[in-house]
Amino acid sequence: MDTTPTRPAELAALPRLMLEPVVRAALLEDLGRAGDITTDAVVPASARAQVALVARQAGVVAGLDAALLAFTLIDPAIATSVARPDGARIAAGETIATLAGPARGLLTGERTALNLLCHLSGIATATAAIVDAIRGTRAHVVCTRKTMPGLRALQKYAVRAGGGSNHRFGLDDAVLIKDNHVAIAGSVGEAVRRARAHAGHMVKIELEVDTLAQLREAMALGVDAVLLDNMDPPMLAEAVAFVAGRALTEASGGITAQTAPAIAAAGVDLLSVGALTHSVRALDIGLDHIG
């Protein structure tokens, strides 16, 4: 019987085709021009070892597939066993996975694997904290395009691992009209008119607003969503009441796990949090030698 733990049913794994270019690039950056000269000098080619990825603090796992791939790309002879998959909540001291095989490959892949696993688990953990804080409200936590270059797909996956959802992935999958677009177009109405004429019938149009007056103008134009930027909870509640379900309402602007409950209680549909990807703290995970 297969007893390998599985990730949550709603969390689909990223295909290896998406992971491998990122992991390969990270390994190549670390290996440089001569490979791991420390390990090659100190560790005999015949040496074997068993190691474990162990959480130093509580959190949510994300990026384990990428981390394990870092080891097996270095040496396919390395065997891996998952104890706590992506999306799992872990306690300090808990083993996430074990690996066994050629010692050189384990040591050479260690830093790249931990860089990915710690960073992505940090995103998942931060996301889960806000998801937990607003549980019982109608709101969902979403990330933004404030991601590290080359890591967007993995970072947005980590948000999903933490129970959040994704905003647009890039400039090409939705229209988001912001203040500078309006300034250059000349007016909110003209910006929306141009966007509607250009976008296909499957493309949603969202408009950023800072005031209730701008919100009234946005709703008169029939946009699909409104980004309520830097509004306090009382103003958000007034905005939600005015929209009355005619468009999605998205709150943004410095949202944290501490401020999120009051914002969600205002009745918005989405809480947009850029900090989940642009400045998250890595989860402390180590690689321990166990044999």
Image (spheres, helix red, strand yellow):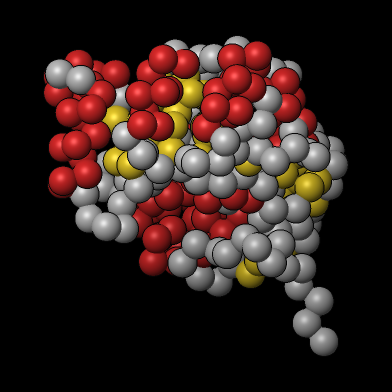
Q: Nearer the viewer, residue 38 or 233?
A: 233
Kindly tell me whether residue 188 is visible in this rendering.
yes
Q: Is 195 rendered above or below residue 65?
A: above
| Residue in the image at 75% along x and 53% along y | 88
Q: Is 91 rendered above or below residue 105?
A: above
Q: Nearer the viewer, residue 43 or 168?
A: 168
Q: Nearer the viewer, residue 106 or 90?
A: 90
Task: Name the spot of residue 245 as percent of width and height, x first.
Answer: 56, 41
Task: Name the spot of residue 184 as percent of width and height, x first.
Answer: 14, 19
* Number of numbered markers: 0
| Residue in the image at 49% along x and 28% along y | 274
| Residue in the image at 49% along x and 41% along y | 246
Q: Quadrant of residue 254?
A: top right
Quadrant for the N terminus, please.
Answer: bottom right
In-image side of 46 versus 186 (left or right): right
Kindly tell me whether residue 42 is visible in this rendering.
no
Task: Name the spot of residue 39 as percent of width and height, x first.
Answer: 51, 46
| Residue in the image at 40% along x and 43% along y | 224
Q: Residue furthest front?
A: 220
Quadrant for the C terminus, please.
Answer: bottom right
Task: Name the spot of residue 189 as percent of width and height, x first.
Answer: 23, 27
Q: Residue furthest bottom?
A: 1
Q: Nearer the viewer, residue 121 or 139?
A: 139
